[in-house]
Image (tube, rainbow, N blue to C red):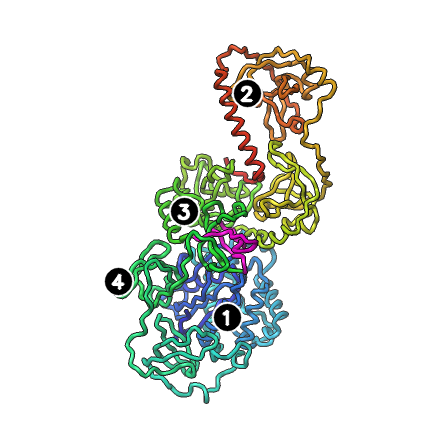
């Protein structure tokens, strides 16, 4: 709720789209700590400020400084709620009555007038007239002053940034140039590193530069005249009054009709009809603004025109009693004038005592709050599917039974919050760092179920208290994007909260540590990829060592000696923008597979022939590349094959050089893919996987084998067997000779043993490096293409009486067990054939 401006204090309004750093800038101007609850700072591209924040404070939090009112409007640019949020901004500014300075906040690394900022500025001009431009200043955030950032900017100076953006504004908004004192001058501009202004651990030079810019901005704001913004509540946007016309002082509010301390009832408001019928206490009459300041029962104050107030004749000493709140209800806290950091927080009603309610916050703390400061919220039906009818914005959710989106949520049990409802789809920001749209009725499916957020937060706190071994992926809140992998890195998200980093890794995000004679920077906590789908993911603390491409882990992290030697700023990586799930489902209806190709990226085991849609328009919509294009993925080269449906979702498939077949990536947006050329892709023949018929030469040898060489067969439980090791026989059957050492594309080695019959035909057997007994590659006619001779090794015969052989019955039992495990692995590989895309420090 907005607070009235103190007499003579400037009102500073921050304008800008989501993610440019408005809340961090406000935190610096108010001199608040980074973890304050007034201006909520987020690391994602989703809006964190969902309601307007209007905070009375002193410049930079210094008691010796003058007062100001900082206004941080709700974030816009991330959903259909923008219209409602923009209307809220206008109502807020009307209620304030005047504004000294509108600060247009821009990201200095990507300064541009996008559609969101353009609409916001156009609305301000329409509502407050062309004079609005006389009260505009530009602040370029994330203007880092360290040497590396200066080199990255190159020759682009502050003046160039200021002039370019001023010219862009003049082009789109002609009045912006006409209304300035000197039309040729650019806008007053300031270049700020807000983080340096509030982080005492950053270098003093960076902090001094940031604070100096903020001081310059404060001087300009204090000297700026006020722009009247108060209008009649029943005046529509676009009318003459809404465009900033001064009120007629002879007809409007010329007398003090209502005594200070009297009770009035609000009526006839069109802009904020929710206030109609409310009773309020008259605080004062502001003649300059021609409005009454009235205090509502929840403690908030509003500026209201006299025509929208009606006297209450009966004597009242207390405002009407708030409705009874039952235990277990969800509420929102508002209207607190003392503990303002609690305003806007969600709480759970525990009990009522002495006219107040004891409520539990999400951090587990208990507070005693008056009924008038609690607003009931809809309580999600925990465990039920999220549908169009019961969807609640802001509620916590996790994947449900209809889920088809792999691990977009971070894995089973991970949670997120509904950011917006768009028809039969819900926009969800996951704690894994990613965001996307999910079905809440589309195609008859519901991907999400509700979660008890208070139980979830409580479980997270307990896990952190118990230590690293109890912390699971679902307990993380991964908000920081950074390169994952010491080489060939891809973008991932990390949890950088101090309590999480210390519980898992023993240090904090951004700390420089000395480990094994080298220095590294602590990045945050993330998951290590599991080698098998059914194994749980492991959490580790990641560090960036000098000259490494991205973050990795140390060997035996629990036992290493680590010493903190300092702290530094860590630059966030560019956030990946994934394909919209809703758009993917529309593309799925277009997919027409026609091109036959091999599917199975990691092994010939389980490989099948599948058909792909290779049309350019389909491939580009799904993955951004065309069939036959040659791309570089990390340090590997791949050719684009086409699109096929996986569980109803269209996926773009690639064939990596050196891999047996095509595969896909779980999240293409996190990979660093570069187009390097084109390559013709041949369609795979129908008989590609079929074992070829025996040649006449091999058929002739089949009945004349001389199996004289005794050697173990099978691994790890071997049995005695005999092989034909004659060179002409081995070459005819498998292309290699007894004793030759061969290597495959991955560098794995094996030595040729000899030939024996298996499944009714002669086959060449090998002993893989590290194995006890011999085995064969299947399907060998495909594996043979990857094998090359790299050496020679003499094999010693092993007598059937050697003690290494187990009892036959035990060997047979173990063979059946291994066959069952092999079949399970094959089925798993057919279901999920992802590439291995993580390279970590070992």
Compare residues 46 and 394 and report the one nearer the observer.
394
Choose the circle earlier in sequence order: 4 or 1. Answer: 1
Q: Are marks 2 and 4 in contact (CB under 8 Å)?
A: no
Instruction: Tell me the CA gap for discs 1 and 3.
Output: 39 Å
- Residue at 71% across / 36% down in the picture? 684
**Residue at image mark 3:** 500
- Mark toward the start of the polypeptide (4 vs 3): 4
Q: Is residue 602 magenta?
A: no
Q: Which one is in front in this view, the residue at disc 2 or the one at disc 1?
A: 2
Q: Dot 1: what SS? A: helix
* Mark 2 and mark 1: Cα distance apart in space: 74 Å
Which of the two discs, 2 and 4, labels the residue nearer the N terminus?
A: 4
Report the Cα–Cα distance between label 4 and label 3: 35 Å
Q: Is residue 427 visible?
A: yes
Between 771 and 765, the residue placed more toward the observer is 765
Mark 4 vs mark 3, foreground winner is 4
Label number found at residue 714: 2
Q: In the shown orientation, is residue 315 left or right of residue 87?
A: left
Residue occupied by mark 4: 353
In the rendered image, which residue does mark 1 sit on?
Answer: 87
Image coords of residue 576 (percent x, y): 56, 51
* Magenta region: 423-450
Q: Provide the secondary structure element on which disc 3 rests.
A: helix
Graded by Cα atoms within 10 Å as few (under 14), some (14 to 19) or many (20 or more), the crowding at tag 2 reads some
Mark 2 or 3: the one toward you: 2
Q: Looking at this view, name the residue that lies furthest to the front.
A: 444
């Amino acid at each position: 709720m907005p607070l009235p401006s103190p007499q003579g204090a400037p009102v500073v309004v921050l304008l800008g789209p989501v993610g440019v750093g408005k809340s961090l800038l406000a935190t610096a101007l108010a001199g608040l700590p980074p973890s304050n609850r007034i201006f909520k700072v987020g690391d994602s591209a989703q809006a964190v400020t969902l309601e307007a924040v209007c905070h009375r404070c002193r410049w930079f939090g210094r008691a010796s400084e003058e007062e100001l009112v900082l206004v941080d409007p709700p974030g816009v640019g991330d959903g259909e709620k923008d219209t409602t949020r923009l209307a809220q901004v206008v109502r807020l500014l009307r209620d304030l009555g005047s504004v000294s300075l509108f600060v247009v906040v821009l990201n200095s690394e990507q300064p541009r007038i996008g559609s969101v900022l353009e609409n916001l500025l156009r609305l301000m001009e329409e509502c407050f007239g062309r004079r609005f431009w006389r009260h505009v200043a530009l602040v370029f955030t994330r203007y880092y002053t360290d040497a590396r950032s200066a080199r990255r900017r190159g020759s682009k100076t502050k003046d160039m940034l200021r002039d370019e953006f001023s010219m862009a504004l003049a082009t789109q908004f002609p009045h912006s140039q006409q209304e300035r004192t000197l039309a040729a001058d650019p806008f007053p501009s300031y270049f700020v590193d807000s983080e340096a202004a509030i982080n005492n651990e950053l270098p003093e030079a960076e902090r001094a530069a940031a604070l100096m810019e903020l001081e310059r901005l404060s001087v300009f704001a204090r000297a700026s005249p006020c722009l009247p913004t108060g209008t009649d509540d029943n005046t529509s946007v676009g009318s003459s009054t809404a465009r900033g016309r001064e009120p007629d002082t002879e007809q409007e509010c010329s007398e003090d009709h209502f005594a200070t301390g009297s009770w009035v009832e609000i009526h006839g408001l069109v802009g904020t009809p929710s206030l109609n019928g409310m009773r309020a206490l008259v605080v004062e009459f502001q003649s300059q603004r021609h409005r009454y300041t009235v205090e509502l029962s929840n403690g908030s104050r509003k500026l209201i025109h006299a025509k929208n107030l009606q006297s209450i004749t009966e004597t009242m000493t207390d405002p009407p009693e708030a409705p009874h709140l039952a235990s277990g209800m969800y509420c929102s806290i508002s209207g607190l004038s003392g503990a303002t950091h609690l305003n806007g927080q969600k709480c759970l009603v525990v009990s009522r005592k002495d006219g107040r309610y004891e409520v539990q916050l999400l951090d587990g703390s208990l507070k005693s709050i008056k009924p008038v400061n609690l607003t009931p919220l809809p309580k999600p039906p925990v465990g039920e599917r999220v549908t169009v009818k019961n969807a609640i914005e802001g509620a916590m959710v996790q994947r449900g039974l209809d889920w088809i989106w792999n691990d977009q949520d971070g894995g089973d049990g991970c949670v997120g919050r509904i950011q917006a409802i768009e028809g039969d789809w819900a926009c969800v920001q996951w704690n894994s760092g990613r965001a996307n749209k999910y079905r809440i009725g589309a195609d008859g499916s519901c991907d999400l179920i509700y979660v008890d957020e208070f139980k979830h937060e409580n479980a997270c706190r307990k896990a952190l208290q118990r230590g690293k071994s109890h912390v699971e992926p679902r307990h993380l809140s991964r908000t920081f994007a950074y390169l994952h992998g010491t080489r060939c890195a891809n973008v991932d998200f990390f949890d950088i909260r101090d309590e999480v980093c210390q519980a898992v890794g023993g240090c904090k995000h951004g700390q420089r540590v000395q480990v094994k004679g080298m220095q590294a920077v602590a990045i945050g906590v993330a998951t290590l990829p599991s080698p098998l789908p059914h194994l749980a993911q492991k959490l580790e603390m990641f560090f960036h060592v000098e000259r490494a491409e991205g973050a990795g882990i140390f060997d035996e992290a629990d036992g290493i000696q680590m010493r903190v030697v300092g702290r530094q700023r860590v630059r966030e990586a560019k956030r990946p923008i994934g394909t919209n799930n809703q758009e993917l489902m529309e593309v799925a209806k277009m997919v027409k597979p026609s091109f036959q190709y091999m599917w199975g990226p990691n092994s010939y085991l389980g490989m099948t022939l599948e058909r792909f849609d290779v049309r350019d328009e389909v491939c580009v919509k799904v993955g951004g590349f065309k069939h036959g294009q040659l791309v570089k993925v990390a340090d590997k080269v791949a050719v684009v094959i086409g699109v096929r449906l996986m569980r109803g979702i269209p996926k773009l498939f690639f064939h990596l050089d050196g891999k047996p077949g095509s595969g896909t990536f779980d999240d293409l947006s996190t990979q660093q893919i570069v187009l390097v050329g084109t390559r013709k892709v041949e369609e795979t023949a129908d008989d590609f996987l079929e074992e070829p018929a025996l040649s006449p030469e091999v058929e002739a040898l089949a009945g004349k084998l001389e199996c004289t060489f005794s050697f173990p067969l099978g691994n790890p439980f071997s049995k005695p067997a005999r092989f034909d090791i004659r060179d002409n026989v081995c070459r005819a059957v498998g292309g290699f000779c007894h004793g030759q050492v061969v290597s495959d594309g991955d560098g794995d080695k094996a030595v040729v043993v000899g030939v024996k019959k298996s499944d009714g035909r002669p086959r060449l057997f090998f002993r893989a490096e590290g194995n006890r007994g011999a085995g064969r590659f299947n399907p060998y006619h495909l594996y043979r293409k990857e094998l090359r001779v790299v050496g020679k090794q003499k094999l010693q015969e092993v007598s059937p009486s050697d003690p290494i052989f187990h009892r036959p019955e035990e060997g047979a039992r173990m063979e059946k067990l291994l066959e069952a495990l092999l079949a399970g692995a094959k089925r798993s590989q057919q279901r999920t054939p992802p590439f291995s895309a993580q390279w970590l420090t070992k």
